[in-house]
Image (cartoon, rainbow, N blue to C red):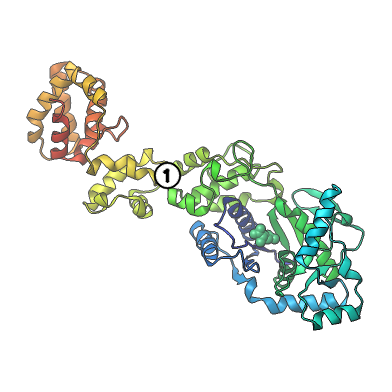
Amino acid sequence: MEKIRVRFAPSPTGLLHIGGVRTAFINYLLAKKENGALVLRIEDTDKVRSTEESKNAIISGLKWLNINWDEGPYFQSERSELYINYLNYLIEKEAVYPCFCKKEEIDIEKEIAKKRGKPYKYSQRCKYLSDKERIDKISKGEEFVYRFNVEPGLVRFNDLIKGEIIFENNILDDFIIIRNDKTPVYNFSCVVDDIDMKITHVIRGEDHLSNTHKQILIYKALNKETPYFGHLPLMLGKDKEKLSKRHGSVSIEEFKNEGFLPEAILNYLFLIGFSIKDNKEIFTMDEMIEEFSLSKISRSSPIFDHDKLRWLNSHYIRNLSDEELFNRAIGFIPNDLISGSREKLLKILREIKPNIKVLGDIKDLTIYFYKQPEYNQQELKNIKNNINFINFINDFINIIDDIEPFESSLIESYINKILKEKNILLKDIAQPLRYLLTGKYVSPGLFILIELLGKEKTKKRISIIL
Ligand code: GLU
């Protein structure tokens, strides 16, 4: 059987969007599952909108996610000759014609269509120029584009995800395939490359369905077999609107900067995009490849829920060893902590691990280890009124210097001894103590917290109440 070849073909006109990541990932899974190949192709023929920054963001984003491609990256901007060769074939067949209409002329046509309440379609004025007229215009140096000559009829194909699709050609006008600077327009370069790269399956977002109509016409004119097409339903936000900045992070860069792990992102995309039996939610890469099938792709739009992704991310973080967490969190750990003892830092990470949803939380979860907390005066007042607590603190301050080594188990037994003598319960002192030590009501366990803060900070913070 023919080997499956798929591609991810982004236009480098912005950051790598999570929707694009989903397309890339599904192509990756298909290639892996079928032992095929994934090609990365950067569609940068639009010189005005393509940027170097965006190319870099796409490539580094995919690498960070571990979506590894087998061939490429190919850059369309470096393949002009190929498109011109294919264009010449179409010129020869009269499947395309040069169009000399100026922008102002087209604008007038558009204006007339608008007034008549009709969708704009190019008038085909240049289609009927004689050879002589064409030669004259070209020799006068008039600029021109090439338009595809759309013949009446229909295009019918079986979409791997959406089922049978039929398009009437009369909804199209003679669309441009080569710009006046001789660069190809997306629909043309995409087809030429998919042919040249022997792509067997074109899997992309459903926003490309109308392009597929044009592209199939180009395949036919080139006398080439069409690949299989599959159009993925677009991911939406929780409010069923197009996923945008309003919903939270959208580019992979933003997810990375917030402190999401790539494995959590891919697992999440898999989870919301496929109909999976059982209620299984956590998948390793091997399991996702194993489970993958085009037939399991949801027919309806997956809903992207940032909170659910945070939950999944926290799962992956909890499963990292302290060392791994340290290595992966390095850019997120405040310098004041990095500069201290590594052994202590690993212990801190272990203790806060259950509360980390994204690595960016680390700063807030550790701030009190190196910065004096800012207290709320009302909270302090309430604590001062807690007689049991003040009694406890008085005793604790008196014996704290005796605790040696200053380790959580010994701290625990000293504290328990005081509580027992005073007939106070741990739960009655735990929250005020935690608040004085950290300025927060959520922290690691008290005894390990005291150990990690050290004697001096502990003494200083609890004595402000006296
Ligand atoms: N370059 C197109 C885009 O970024 C996608 C092309 C395709 O997958 O056919 O939207």
Horizontal side, residue 391 vs residue 277: left or right: left
Residue 380 sits above or below residue 460 on the image: above
Task: Give the residue number, with chain letter if any, for mark 1.
Answer: 358
Q: Seen in the image, is 77 located left or right of residue 158?
A: left
Furthest residue to the bottom? 139
Q: Quadrant of residue 412?
A: top left
Taking the spot 54% from the left edge, 48% from the top edge, the residue there is: 250
For the residue labelled by badge 1, is the local secondary structure a helix, a strand or a loop?
Answer: loop
Left or right of 258, for residue 250? right
Can the viewer see residue 165?
no
In which quadrant will I find the C terminus?
A: top left
Instruction: Provide residue 312's location: percent of width, then percent of height.
Output: 49, 41
Q: Is residue 424 or residue 170 the one in the foreground?
A: 170
Q: Position of residue 245 (x, y in %)?
A: 54, 45
Report crowding for label 1: few under 14, some 14 to 19, many 20 or more residues within 10 A (C-alpha). many
Quarter of the picture containing the N terminus is: bottom right
Relative vertical location of residue 315 with respect to residue 16 in this rendering, above or below: above
Apparent side of residue 53 relative to residue 237 in the rendered image (left or right): left
Is disc 1's CB within 8 Å of ligand 1?
Answer: no
Q: In this picture, is 48 found above or below 112? A: below
Which quadrant holds residue 14? bottom right
Q: Which of the pair 436/308 is nearer the observer?
A: 436
Nearest to the observer: residue 31 or residue 21 = 21
Which amino acid does the dot numbered 1 rest on? Val
Q: What is the count of numbered marks?
A: 1
Residue 182 visible, this angle: yes
Can you give x and y, in whole percent of width and height, for residue 438 in the image?
Answer: 25, 34
Q: Going 54% across and 53% down the picture, which residue do you hit?
A: 285
Q: Residue at x 40, y 43 (%)?
A: 318
Q: Quadrant of ligand 1?
A: bottom right
155 or 430: nearer the viewer: 155
Q: Position of residue 101 (x, y in %)?
A: 81, 68
